[in-house]
């Protein structure tokens, strides 16, 4: 497979996304122009709305996870709407000279435009990295619209010094329409963490090739700059230092992620009765690709606790899915750590 083909779906190859579901692409008008939304599943089903991380478009970021998780029990409950940030889809055209990319503070307006376009009464929000930051901001402003929130590698604070130094240099390279080895190293750090030698070598190799061949560096520079300049999200567990988030939240982070401490900080500001923090053992930061079976299990148990899949035996289902996708995987793999020490039923 060539690097151009890798740019479509880094780890899926020729496998069709979301088994037994057809993807529909729809353009939604926002204050920042038209954004691309990929829709998977029956629109009569309950919506899950996703927002992706930097360096990946919506389909690339969520493809592996939703393909693993779309057994009949899952697909019969939900329809997935993958939002692309402006100009971040793989086939996007370069921004015009006068285009102003949205700040992280204004990005929730894009989510709201999608919600209005499709007429959602309520939905489940699902964000990764920069997308998790967007979804958290949206949730705090629109708590009546969210049934639940799933956040992966979420940071609610401003950029740290390491992140700032990495990103400022990369923005300069990307604006000159170049993807350098330094840029690739930064994106690998952002998605995988610092211990690449302990990550799955196949995933590492494929994503290095994928990032090095990104088709639209100048558009990516705008998203990175927006994320770099993000303001802290003000909220608190008891409502005394910012609003209280009153919806159920599942946080997921890989054990080697660069954003573990950030996600712990977010957890400290959430109601422990309505939130769970799950660290996936022996996983890089790109946990949806590295350990999709563990993320699927945590997600389905979380949603089961909210009334979905009431009669489903999730552990048994996950073992069956593992046997189909990875015959050599044993059932003894360590699943996760939960900072709130809540039982598996959430």
Image (cartoon, helix red, strand yellow):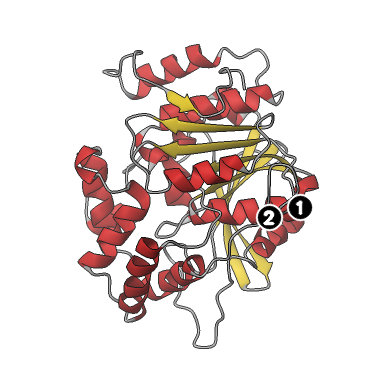
Q: Is residue 119 left or right of residue 175?
A: right
- Pointers 1 and 2 in contact (C-beta within 8 Å): yes
Residue 157 in which image quadrant: bottom right
Classify 296 as above or below 156. Answer: above
Local packing at callout 1 (Cα closer than 10 Å; few below 14, some 14-19, many 20+) is few
Q: Residue, x 54% and y 63% (percent of image)?
A: 85
Which of 281/178 is in front? 281
Which of 298/3 is in front? 298
Secondary element type, mark 1: loop
Residue bearing the label numbered 2: 138
- State the quadrant of the C terminus: top right
Q: Is residue 175 left or right of residue 57?
A: left
Residue 232 in which image quadrant: bottom right
Residue bearing the label numbered 1: 142
Cα gap from disc 1 to disc 2, whole angstroms: 6 Å
Q: Residue extending furthest bottom? A: 97
Q: Is residue 75 left or right of residue 97?
A: right
The image shows residue 60 at horizontal and vertical percentages of: 42, 50
The image shows residue 337 at horizontal and vertical percentages of: 45, 26
The reply to whether residue 9 is visible in this rendering is no
Dot label at residue 198: none
Local packing at callout 2 (Cα closer than 10 Å; few below 14, some 14-19, many 20+) is many
Classify 171 as above or below 78. Answer: below
Secondary element type, mark 2: helix
The reply to whether residue 279 is visible in this rendering is yes
Q: Residue, x 80% and y 46% (percent of image)?
A: 144
Classify 323 as above or below 26. Answer: above
The image shows residue 154 at horizontal and vertical percentages of: 51, 48
Q: Residue, x 31% and y 23% (percent of image)?
A: 326
The image shows residue 214 at horizontal and vertical percentages of: 32, 64
Which of 64/107 is in front? 107
Q: Is residue 314 left or right of residue 46?
A: left
């Amino acid at each position: 497979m060539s690097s151009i083909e890798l740019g479509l779906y880094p780890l899926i190859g020729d496998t069709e996304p979301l088994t037994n579901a057809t993807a529909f692409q729809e353009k939604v008008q926002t204050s920042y122009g038209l954004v691309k939304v990929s829709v998977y599943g029956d629109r009569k089903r309950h919506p899950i709305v996703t927002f992706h991380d930097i360096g990946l478009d919506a389909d690339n970021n969520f493809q592996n996870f939703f393909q693993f998780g779309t057994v009949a029990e899952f697909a019969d409950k939900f329809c997935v709407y993958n939002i692309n940030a402006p100009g971040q889809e793989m086939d996007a055209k370069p921004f015009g000279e006068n285009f102003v990319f949205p700040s992280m503070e204004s990005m929730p307006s894009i989510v709201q435009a999608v919600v209005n376009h499709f007429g959602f009464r309520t939905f489940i929000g699902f964000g990764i990295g920069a997308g998790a930051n967007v979804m958290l901001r949206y949730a705090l402003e629109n708590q009546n619209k969210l049934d639940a929130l799933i956040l992966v590698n979420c940071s609610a604070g401003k950029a740290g010094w390491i992140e700032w130094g990495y990103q400022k240099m990369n923005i300069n390279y990307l604006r000159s329409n170049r993807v350098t080895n330094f840029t690739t190293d930064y994106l690998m750090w952002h998605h995988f963490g610092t211990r690449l030698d302990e990550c799955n070598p196949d995933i590492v190799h494929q994503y290095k090739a994928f990032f090095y061949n990104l088709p639209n560096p100048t558009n990516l520079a705008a998203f990175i700059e927006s994320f770099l300049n993000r303001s802290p999200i003000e909220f608190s567990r008891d409502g005394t230092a910012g609003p209280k988030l009153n919806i159920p939240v599942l946080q997921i982070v890989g054990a080697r992620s660069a954003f573990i401490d950030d996600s712990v900080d977010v957890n400290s500001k959430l109601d422990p009765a309505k939130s769970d923090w799950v660290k996936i053992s022996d996983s890089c930061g790109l946990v949806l690709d590295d350990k999709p079976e563990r993320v699927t299990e945590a997600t389905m148990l979380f949603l089961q606790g909210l009334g979905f899949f009431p009669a489903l035996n999730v552990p048994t289902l996950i073992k069956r899915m593992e046997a189909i996708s990875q015959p050599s995987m044993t059932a003894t793999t360590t699943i996760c750590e939960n900072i709130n020490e809540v039982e598996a039923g959430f």
